[in-house]
Amino acid sequence: MSDKQDETEKKNAPEEAAKQTDGQTDNKNFVCLYVAIGCFAVACILLALSFFIRGAGVYMLIASMLSSLACASFLNAQKRRGENKVCKILRIVNYVVMGAAILVVVVGMGVTSASKQQ
């Protein structure tokens, strides 16, 4: 019976050590937040450039949406490490930018299909 207890103690030891270190250090790691800010900046730049570069607009809109999705993913990863007001504000603004890109794609597809029918 002591063998089973030893095995469970060995399995639980890393989890307990992680809980103890989390309690001792309140140092929050914001690396994912910084990466999310970079992804958001790239998404905004690609969204703006999609209106100015002829022939590459659709590709830049798709890249903008992918970059926004990466930003949302990094913000969700940041939740586990500690969140602040910047994360919440960035999450809202990121979804607005992603929604704007989706809206431009949908409206553009509608205009294109309407012009081909005439």
Image (cartoon, grey):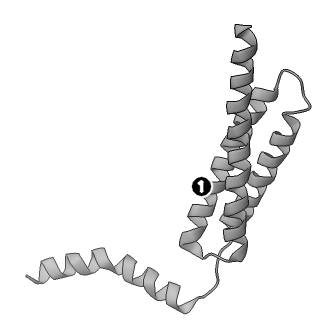
Residue 35 visible in the shown view: no
- How packed mark 1 is, by other alpha carbons closer than 10 Å (few <14, some 14-19, many 20 or more), is some
Say which quarter of the image contains residue 53: top right
Q: Position of residue 21 (x, y in %)?
A: 50, 86
Say which quarter of the image contains residue 74: bottom right
Task: Choose between 90 and 39: the one closer to the eye.
Answer: 90
The residue lying at 60 percent from left, 76 percent from top is 82
Q: Quadrant of the N terminus?
A: bottom left
Q: Is residue 92 left or right of residue 9?
A: right
In this view, the residue farthest toward the top is: 118
Is 39 drawn above or below residue 23 in the view shown? Answer: above
Q: Position of residue 60 (x, y in %)?
A: 78, 33
Q: Position of residue 43 (x, y in %)?
A: 77, 46
Q: Is residue 85 left or right of residue 9?
A: right
The residue lying at 84 percent from left, 20 percent from top is 55
The residue lying at 29 percent from left, 74 percent from top is 11
Q: Amino acid at mark 1?
A: Ser
Task: State the residue position of label 1.
Answer: 73
